[in-house]
Image (cartoon, rainbow, N blue to C red):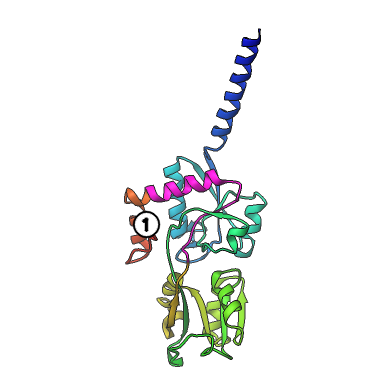
Amino acid sequence: MRIVKQAAIAALALMAVTGAVQAKEWKNIRVAVEGAFPPFNFVGADNQLGGFDVDIAKAICEKMKAECTFAVQDWDGLIPALQAGKFDTIISSMSITDERKKVIDFSRPYYQSPSSFIAPKSAGIKDTSPEALKGKTIGAQSSTVQAAELEQKYKDSDIKLYPTQDEVNLDLVAGRIDMLFVDKLPGLDWLKTADGGNFEFVGTDLPTDGVGAGVRQSDTDLRDQISEAIVAIKADGTYDKINAKYFPFSIWKD
């Protein structure tokens, strides 16, 4: 009788473990993007999400054999909404930082882009050190690594933060700020537009730790599966095809 009971207990334990493993297969994943950061993520004229982040997210989901749905969330609300369980991962050009790692976890990086200053061509700015930019009005999107860098190191400059990058760009064009500080790749994309034609990168680029998919700290299994999928889409050529669709050079981070 004891043997039967022990066997039954063992069977139940095995079912529990199996169920836990199955629960972590992540066959349905809710992905959040800002939807306002071209060319990485944006809402097109057809009201459909597009961009590098979106294409990479779809490729990751396909590699994981998971059904993914997308949600658009304002930048400042991405991390709080992830923590609240409104979605499972942020794949929205979120830079990996020590500060963010205190509250969420990240996959391995899926691209690298430095931070850069943009100013009018007529300004002739060469030096972008904190000392050289004393008294300058500098714009950046709030809750970004660029905003944190400005607030920490450029204390003698007038720092203006905005909800979206589009608003930063518009204020630069309107002359309400002297320059802006941005992730270099979307900055490069903006410089190619009619609005960006009179502006240029100035000074020295500042390196970052790369961009990863953000997940809740409790979802280490999802973090690891996304990381494995990122490596896999790079190995099979999918990543390079997506990269070439948006950029004439590789943005992969080893």
Q: Position of residue 153 (x, y in %)?
A: 57, 80
Quarter of the image holding residue 12?
A: top right
Name the residue at the front extreme: 2
Q: What residue is at 54 percent from the left and 73 percent from the top?
A: 146
Q: Which residues are magenta?
A: 209-232
Residue 215 on the magenta span: yes
Q: What residue is at 58 percent from the left and 83 percent from the top?
A: 154
- Asked if residue 95 can be seen in this view, the reply is yes
Q: Position of residue 243 (x, y in %)?
A: 36, 60
Q: What residue is at 65 percent from the left and 49 percent from the top?
A: 85
Q: Position of residue 99 (x, y in %)?
A: 60, 64
Instruction: Look at the picture and state if 58 lies above or below 159.
Output: above
Name the residue at the right extreme: 84
Left or right: where 204 falls relative to 173: left
Residue 62 on the magenta span: no
Residue bearing the label numbered 1: 242
Does dot 1 land on a helix, a strand or a loop?
helix
Viewer-proximal residue among 33 and 89: 89
Q: Position of residue 70 (x, y in %)?
A: 54, 51
Viewer-proximal residue among 136 and 42: 136
Instruction: Look at the picture and state if 41 lies above or below 2.
Output: below
Q: What residue is at 57 percent from the left and 35 percent from the top?
A: 23
- Asked if residue 167 can be seen in this view, the reply is no
Q: Quadrant of the C terminus?
A: bottom left
Q: Residues within 10 Å of mark 1 (few under 14, many from 20)?
A: some
Q: How many marks?
A: 1
Amino acid at dot 1 = Ile
Quarter of the image holding residue 174?
A: bottom right
Left or right: where 194 falls relative to 29: left
Q: Quadrant of the N terminus?
A: top right
Left or right: where 236 falls relative to 128: left
